[in-house]
Amino acid sequence: MTANEFHLNRRSLLAKGGAAAAFGLAGVYPGLICAQDRATSIDHTIRIGPVSLELAPGKIVKATGYNGTVPGPVLRLREGKPVAINVINDAGYPDLVHWHGLYLPSIQDGAMEEGSPMIAPEQSLVYSFAPKPSGTRWYHSHAMAGTDLTRSTYSGEFGFLIVEPAAGDPGRYDREVLLAAHLWEGEWVSMQDLHKGPPPDNGLEVVYHAATFGDRMLGHGDPIRVKQGERVLFRLLNASASMGTTLALPGHRFTVIALDGNPVPSPTAVDVLRLDVAERADVIVEMNNPGVWVFGSTDDMDREMGLGVIVEYENRGGEPQWAAPQNAHWDYTIFGKSGLAAAPDETIQLKFEKVPGGRGGYNRWTINGKSWPDTNPLFTVQQGKRYRLVMDNHSGDEHPVHMHRHTFEITKVGDKPTSGVMKDTISMPRYSTAEIDFVADDPGPTFFHCHHQDHMDEGFAALITYT
Ligand SMILES: [Cu+2]
């Protein structure tokens, strides 16, 4: 028996919910179960498996990844065109793939909490869907990691998923560069031990020892080679498990044209990009400052860990130059419209808090005083109605708050009303408030959580359900 036959025999077909029956979920989500609809051909195969990454000469990290590379292969799909993706799980633990930023039936979404099946080790699963909306999406593990810093988003299980518009829209650029930031070699540390001081009640946090922006540590991969006068489209992703990052390219500005893959109403040039975990930015950079530059984190320690890449103009050499940006301010609202967003049908208050784990313990997280799974349902929605989430981050940590299967509109940041910026993840700085609106336009259980792996695993998660 060949490996292929093995998987054909054992795979569970997910097309139109076929796998739900196989996994005994028919009783839970009867509306999603259709006749077994076999995918006739596989368009892409993703094998989750061990990889040995040489981040820099002699610096080897053992991780899991997709098809032997990190990031995984870029999946370029056409909006609305059905695709079948066979995922083979050789990760050595139960796993699944989430298609981040897409409108998918819950069972296809790759979130166990929504009813998507887990893929047992050495089994495979076919995800079959018509991708939408167009834009810079990504795919990654949505398994729990708990305290295991080799699993899920701590590992190398991430890749770009670009949904090309149904009607071709090449855009005005000469070169496209995809870069994902990731942190490696995580370790649980008590912050009070690290800082030799307060806060005394805080629990363990993950600190990292290596970073990549692209596929190697800063200075060890191929430089991005550009020519003077080029317009480069960078599609940027923070694929870290738990750390936001601020990026700069000295001597250049970023014209932000899309956030989380969705075009912004007011494309604006900025000196820095703030990307929290899971956030994406599509930016255009005019290459009009010849030299050799470091494009990387504005945090010196992050760059020293490797979070950067060299941008090298044609016929230029010498040491890569870095300079701290003058204006490191980041504000979603400058990309929005000034008018008010549509009035919601209903407003929901959400308060996020931390229950410190104390020295050597793990912190826990709550939404309105409850941790997953006691958060269910967070609230219920009616199809077609518009909901406003009034969110209060009542904690000293930053939270990238992510909503599955829907796109939301940022309607307020702090005290500043805004509209028109559409996202699937919003970064909430410590002790901050924000409001987001969404239309209940994709029936099915919908996972809502912090994209910080540790925060999600320790309670900061809930389900929004449809009536
Ligand atoms: Cu969080």
Image: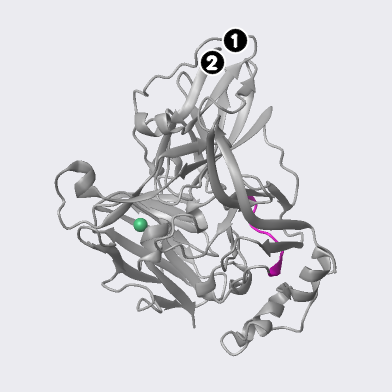
- The x, y position of residue 35, in whole percent, is 76, 84
The image quadrant where one finds the N terminus is bottom right
Residue at the spot 30% in from the left edge and 65% down from the top edge = 365
Tell me if I can see residue 329 in this picture: yes
Q: Over which residues does the magenta segment extend?
A: 123-136
What SS does tag 2 mark? strand
Does the segment drawn in magenta span residue 40? Answer: no
Cβ of mark 1 under 8 A from ligand 1 = no
Neighbour tally class for label 2: few under 14, some 14-19, many 20 plus, Cα within 10 Å: many
Residue at the spot 45% in from the left edge and 51% down from the top edge = 241
Q: Mark 2 = which residue? A: 292
What SS does tag 1 mark? loop
Residue at the spot 20% in from the left edge and 42% down from the top edge = 195
Neighbour tally class for label 1: few under 14, some 14-19, many 20 plus, Cα within 10 Å: few
- The x, y position of residue 225, in whole percent, is 64, 21
Q: As rendered, which of 239 and 169 lies closer to the eye?
A: 239
Q: As rendered, which of 64 and 458 lies closer to the eye?
A: 64
Tags 1 and 2 touching, CB below 8 Å: yes
Q: Is residue 398 left or right of residue 17?
A: left
- The x, y position of residue 187, in whole percent, is 37, 49
Q: Mark 1 = which residue? A: 316
Residue type, mark 1 in image: Arg
